[in-house]
Amino acid sequence: MSIESSFISFLSIYFFSGYTIFNTIVYWIILVIALFMIIKIFKHYKINPTDLIIPLMPFIFLGSSVRALVDNGIYPYNWFLITPGIYFIVAGIVVLSIF
C-alpha cells in the first residue's frame, strides 16, 4: 500500500465518514485559529465587526443554501459542498471580496 492510498484511506475514514471525534477536534482547532486571525486583522485595520453584519448576510445565506441543496439531492454530495468544505469555500470568497 502506497503512502498516497494510505493518506486517502485515512481521509475517507476520519473526515468523510460523518462526524467523528477526530474531525470535530480538527475543525474546532481550525475555527479557533481562524477566529484569532480575524480578530488580529480587525484590530490591525481598525474594523468594527458590527459594520460587516449586513454585507456578510448573502454569504451566510449562500453557505446555508448550498448545504441544504446538497442534503435534498439537488447538488451532488462531495467534500466541497458539505460541511466544512462549503464553509471554507464561502470564507475564502468572503476574504477575497473584502480585500
Image: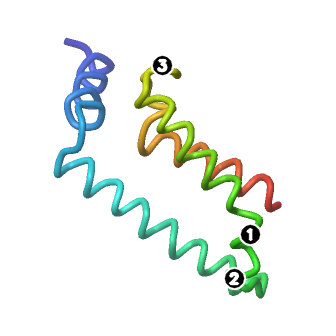
Q: What amino acid type is highlighted by mark number 2?
A: Thr
Left or right of 86, for residue 95: right
Could you say whether the residue bearing mark 2 is in a helix, strand or loop?
helix
Q: What amino acid type is highlighted by mark number 3?
A: Pro
Question: Furthest residue to the front?
Answer: 72
The structure residue drawn at horizontal position 62% and vertical position 47%, both measured from the top left corner, is 90
Left or right of 10, for residue 73: right
Q: Which of 67 and 26 is in front in this view?
A: 67
Q: What amino acid type is highlighted by mark number 1?
A: Ile
Residue 74 x/y as whole percent: 51, 21
Q: Which of 7 and 41 is in front in this view?
A: 41
* Colour convention of the picture: rainbow
Give the image quarter of residue 31. Answer: bottom left
Q: Which of marks 1 and 3 is nearer the N terminus?
A: 1
Residue 20 x/y as whole percent: 18, 45
Residue 80 x/y as whole percent: 50, 32
Q: Which of marks 2 and 3 is nearer the N terminus?
A: 2
Residue receiving disc 1: 54
Residue receiving disc 3: 76
The structure residue drawn at horizontal position 73% and vertical position 73%, both measured from the top left corner, is 52
Distance from disc 2 to disc 3, alpha carbons, whole Å, reads 35 Å
Could you say whether the residue bearing mark 1 is in a helix, strand or loop?
helix
Q: Residues within 10 Å of mark 2 (few under 14, many from 20)?
A: few
Residue receiving disc 2: 50
Decide: is 81 above or below 47: above
Decide: is 58 above or below 52: above
Decide: is 13 above or below 1: below
The structure residue drawn at horizontal position 25% and vertical position 14%, both measured from the top left corner, is 2
Could you say whether the residue bearing mark 3 is in a helix, strand or loop?
loop
Distance from disc 1 to disc 3, alpha carbons, whole Å, reads 30 Å
